[in-house]
């Protein structure tokens, strides 16, 4: 009577082991896909970066004492008025 249960237990353990092996193989496949996608995304970013950087101009050098124009919409204040107060 115990022998039948032992055989059943061995079969169950083998099925569990096979499930673990299949899960590990599936997980390794996902890891490989993720690595390939990261590499592909990095390559695409590099291809887009060069033309985009060519269109950008460098910021002008501003020194203390230089006169500049600023837009009020970029200045955050607690006052409801758009006029700048000293």
Image (cartoon, rainbow, N blue to C red):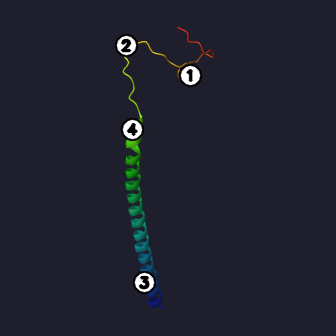
Of the two numbered discs 3 and 2 in the rendering, the one whose residue sits closer to the viewer: 2
Question: In the displayed structure, would residue 10 be above or below residue 68?
Answer: below
Q: Nearer the viewer, residue 46 or 25?
A: 46
Q: Answer yes or no: do the residues labelled 2 and 1 have beta carbons within 8 Å?
A: no
Q: Mark 4 or mark 1: which comes first in sequence?
A: 4
Q: Mark 3 or mark 2: which comes first in sequence?
A: 3
User: Spatial distance from mark 3 to mark 2, Cα to Cα?
Assistant: 82 Å
Percent position (x, y) of residue 38? Answer: 40, 54
Q: Quadrant of residue 9?
A: bottom left
In this picture, residue 31 sits left or right of residue 71: left
Question: In the displayed structure, would residue 8 be above or below residue 73?
Answer: below
Question: In the displayed structure, would residue 2 be above or below residue 52?
Answer: below
User: Spatial distance from mark 4 to mark 3, Cα to Cα?
Assistant: 64 Å
Disc number placed over residue 73 in the picture, else none: 1
Question: In the displayed structure, would residue 83 be above or below residue 5?
Answer: above
| Mark 2 element type | loop
User: Spatial distance from mark 4 to mark 1, Cα to Cα?
Assistant: 27 Å
Q: Mark 2 or mark 1: which comes first in sequence?
A: 2
Circle 2 residue: 64
| Mark 4 element type | helix
Circle 4 residue: 53
| Mark 1 element type | helix
How busy is the neighbourhood of tag 1: few (under 14 within 10 Å), some, or many (20 plus)? Answer: few
Percent position (x, y) of residue 27? Answer: 42, 66
Q: Mark 3 or mark 1: which comes first in sequence?
A: 3
Q: Quadrant of residue 85?
A: top right
User: Spatial distance from mark 3 to mark 1, Cα to Cα?
Assistant: 74 Å
Percent position (x, y) of residue 45? Answer: 40, 47
Of the two numbered discs 4 and 3 in the rendering, the one whose residue sits closer to the viewer: 4
How busy is the neighbourhood of tag 3: few (under 14 within 10 Å), some, or many (20 plus)? Answer: few
| Mark 3 element type | helix
């Amino acid at each position: 009577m115990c022998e039948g249960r032992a055989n059943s237990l061995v079969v169950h353990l083998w099925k569990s082991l096979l499930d673990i092996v299949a899960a590990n193989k599936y997980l390794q496949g996902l890891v490989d896909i993720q690595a390939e996608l990261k590499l592909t995304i990095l390559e695409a970013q590099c291809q887009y970066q060069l033309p985009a950087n060519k269109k950008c101009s460098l910021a002008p050098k501003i020194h203390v004492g230089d006169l500049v124009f600023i837009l009020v919409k970029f200045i955050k204040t607690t006052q409801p008025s758009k006029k700048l107060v000293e």
